[in-house]
Amino acid sequence: MMPFIDLATQRERIREQLDATLSKIINEGRYIFGPEVTELETRLAEFGQASHALTCANGTDAISLPLMAWEIGPGDAVFVPSFTFASTAEVVALLGATPVFVDILPDTYCMDPDSLAASIEWAKGEPGLTPRAVIAVDLFGQPADYPAISTLARSNGLKLIADSAQGFGCTLNDQHPVAWADIATVSFYPAKPLGCYGDGGAVLTNDDELAHLIKSLRNHGEGEARYAYDRIGMNSRLDTLQAGVLLAKLDVFADEINGRNRGAALYRRGLSNAVKTPVVIDGGVSVWAQYTIEVADRDGFRAKLGEAGVPTAVYYPVPIHVQQPYAKYPQAPGGLPATEAAMSRVVSLPMDAYLESGRGAQVVEAVRNAL
């Protein structure tokens, strides 16, 4: 069975720098907030076109931190897609606020601005609810429709989070999501396009005050003096070893984004006349965290690919609003028809920066044979 994500080829590519960096960190012994963490934050900000980048323990905390900074809690409505990983809604519920589930566009799978607009209007008239924020997700690695979503957020006085857990490095009209959002959040989970060898996350923002608050919140609410606390915070620090891994990967990240796009083009050429292939927003560049197609008989299709030695994955067979803990939360007026149509048909193919070595052609052949 071929790998779903070829991390081994990437590891060999960066092994020399990786070994040197990790050896230096171990020898110096500065495992928390070592100099590599500061270097990584500087480079992340430069790459993501942001004034500030602050690392944290994982992508879930990255979403929690701005919500905490804005003091979002009970009685507040936060608008989120359901067709995404649980973290996007989970952090809202954990803070006592109300996630309001918004539908997706059927072609890009990202948040539908029309569904968002209807949801905001509904929440405005709902007793006990105050609209406070929108969390748009850069699903499968491509940017959401930020010009439309940010216009809605600004006109309604809402904060906007770009959940780029899967999408760090994606752009729209040559700009990163933070150009429209108050903050962009990142996950460095190993399977992400820019992943570490454990858990990790980051936030990017152009808001000086927000960056100051998050720097405190991620480290127990620290103040200016040691053991002085200005607020209640959390323990959410990226360790120095993971920063070292990410520094090595950042050196090849731009080239890997190009490789992922070449792999996606290979798939598109081979499959566009056979299945529903992904659509990228006009002006958008995806980092292709996943390459997701739609088929009618998903179970049969996956079985045939498995027999051919090609692994597949399904994101997300059970959207969040269908899950028992989240069923009590409100949905957009008219429901989530695009979300529910996609949930039974989507399937993702192997995707990384190294498909041109022959794996991509093997996948295309297997898909066409399976169909």
Image: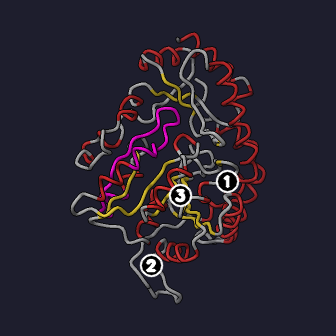
Q: Name the residue under label 3.
A: 185
- Does the magenta segment cover residue 116? yes
Q: Which residue is drawn at 25% across and 44% down?
A: 327
Secondary structure of the residue carrying tag 3 is strand
Which residue is at the front of the view, 130 or 288? 130
Q: Are circles 1 and 3 on residues that touch, CB within 8 Å?
A: no
Q: Mark 2 points at which residue?
A: 221
**Percent of width and height locating residue 353:** 69, 37
> Toward which corner of the image does residue 334 lie, by quadrant?
top left
Residue type at tag 3: Thr
Separation of residues labelled 1 and 2 (CA atoms): 32 Å
- In the drawing, what numbered circle is on residue 186? none
**Percent of width and height locating residue 172:** 64, 48
Q: Is residue 370 left or right of residue 11?
A: left
Q: Earlier in the sequence, mark 1 or mark 2?
A: 1
- Does the magenta segment cover residue 194? no
**Percent of width and height locating residue 342:** 42, 30
Q: Which residue is drawn at 66% across and 70% down?
A: 38
Q: In which quarter of the image is the N terminus?
A: top right
Q: Residue at x 40, y 33 (%)?
A: 338
Q: Name the residue under label 1.
A: 175
Secondary structure of the residue carrying tag 2 is loop
Crowding around mark 3 (Cα neighbors within 10 Å: few <14, some 14 to 19, many 20+) is many
Q: What stretch is highlighted in magenta?
A: 91-117
Query: Residue lying furthest right in this view?
Result: 16
The mark lying in front, picked from 1 and 2, is 1
Q: Which of marks 1 and 3 is nearer the N terminus?
A: 1
Separation of residues labelled 3 and 2 (CA atoms): 19 Å
Residue type at tag 1: Gln
Q: In this view, does 284 lie to the left or right of 133?
A: right
